[in-house]
Image (cartoon, rainbow, N blue to C red):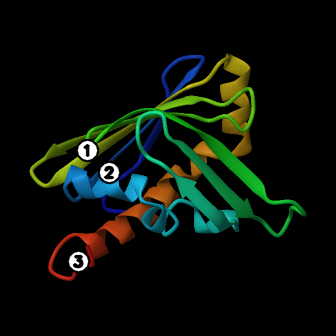
Amino acid sequence: MHNPTTVERKSERELVITRTFDGPARIVFQAWTRPGLIQRWWTPKSFGMSFLSCELDARTGGTYRFVFSHPAFEQPMAFFGRYVEVTPPSRIVWTNEESPDGALSTLTFEENGGKTLLVLHELYPSKQALDDAIASGAPGGAPEQFESLDELLATLVGPDATE
């Protein structure tokens, strides 16, 4: 892993995940806002989940809905919410409405010298909601998830870029 991912609990209700990516902010931003790209990296392979559908309208007031299957569950799992703020290529704020304990997620992209520092700040409605999220293992998947994003970005940036 050439760019480490940090996952840090900042307070009773806040979790912050950071990672630097090799590539300009506009390309990293696109990887978070285009359905065809997000489906290529979003799910950590070790979780065994597969995308069934990915709908997103990445603009302020827009919505998203990701539906996954998993061999251990009979029914698909859906993650959905709305975009509170979308400011290309520097900031995305969205809700996580699949449960009342969903976080408000704020993602910032800061470019420096062709690299992008990504900071994901999640604010949960209560200490228990964050405790439950951590216990589920979801935040622990961020390093693997971001490794997949690194792999995708390598195909979008540089001499062999597909974008």
User: Could you say where residue 80 lies in the image, as x and y percent from the top left?
Assistant: 64, 44
What's the residue type where badge 2 is placed? Phe
Quadrant containing the C terminus is: bottom left
Q: Secondary structure at mark 1?
A: loop
Report the residue at 66% width, 31% height from top: 102
Left or right placement of residue 23 versus residue 133 in this view? left
Gap in angstroms between the C-alphas marked 2 and 1? 6 Å
Residue 44, image quadrant:
bottom right
Nearest the viewer among 109 and 87 is: 87
Marks 3 and 1, how far apart in space? 19 Å
* Quadrant placement of the N terminus: bottom left
Mark 2–mark 3 Cα distance, whole angstroms, equals 16 Å
Mark closer to the chain start, 2 or 3: 2
Query: Are the two marked residues, 2 and 1, in contact with CB atoms closer than 8 angstroms?
Result: yes
Residue at (41, 48) in percent of width and height = 5
Q: Relative to residue 42, is residue 65 depicted above or below?
A: above
- Tell me the amino acid under the disc marked 3: Ala
Against 119, residue 113 (above or below) is: below
Q: Which residue is mark 3?
A: 161
Compared to residue 132, the image places residue 46 above or below, namely: below
Left or right of 161, for residue 18: right
What's the amino acid at mark 1? Pro
Question: Residue 148, how many percent across, how many down?
Answer: 45, 66
Determine the image quadrant of residue 108.
Answer: top left
Residues under numbered marks 2 and 3 in contact, where contact means CB atoms less than 8 Å apart: no
Provide residue 104's location: percent of width, then percent of height. 54, 28
Give the residue number, with chain letter if any, for mark 2. 29
SS class of the residue under badge 2? helix
Secondary structure at numbered mark 3: loop
At horizontal 17% and vertical 74% (from top left) the residue drawn is: 158
Residue at the (13%, 55%) spot, across then down: 114
Residue 89 — which label? 1
